[in-house]
Image (cartoon, grey):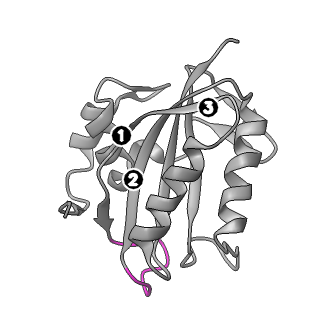
Amino acid sequence: MTTVAAFVGLGANLGDPVAQVTQAMADLAALDATRVVRSSSLYRTAPIGHAAQPEFVNAVVLLDTGLPPRRLLDALLDIERAAGRERSFPNAPRRLDLDLLLYGEQRIDAPGLVVPHPRMHERAFVLAPLAEIAPNAVVPGHGRAAELLRAVGDQEVRAIERT
């Protein structure tokens, strides 16, 4: 079976965000034809867009997957739904958000599926955990994760101490 390196962004700010992101990492590891290669630390980040909400907990996971992009996205949406995700309005508070950030070196622009994830190159809450586990990961059309992170250094991202 041919596999692809795929990066998934995780975030939550309702309920118990640390527990929900940690559970989602375990759920990703349980996907068919998929294994977790590396997981970032957890990070606390300020909300973007709708600012009147709690801080987020964010992370990035590197998967080695045999799932095609649409099936992987569908699996991510299933994990979100199982965690109680509701989509009330853009940038709303959420129990869990899973984003397919990168799928190999592919560029995909299909209804409901855009890879690389739009605006990921502008967001420290994605770039900090991505650069932690894969500093040389390339965001097609934008550059390497570590270089992109330096460009958004004014966005506050704090690693959560592991206990």
Element under label 3?
Answer: strand
Give the numbered dot on residue 59: 2
Disc with the residue nearer the chain's start (1 vs 3): 3
Amino acid tagged 2? Ala
Element under label 2?
Answer: strand
Quick one: label 1, few (<14), some, or many (20+) residues within 10 Å? many
Tell me if residue 100 can be seen: no
Quarter that holds the N terminus: top right
- In the image, the segment drawn in magenta is 46-54
Q: Which residue is mark 3?
A: 34
Disc with the residue nearer the chain's start (2 vs 1): 2
Quarter of the image where one finds residue 29: top right
Q: Position of residue 121 (x, y in %)?
A: 42, 42
Q: In front here: 48 or 53?
A: 53
Tell me if residue 162 can be seen: yes
Q: Is residue 48 magenta?
A: yes
Does 146 appear above or below 26? Answer: above
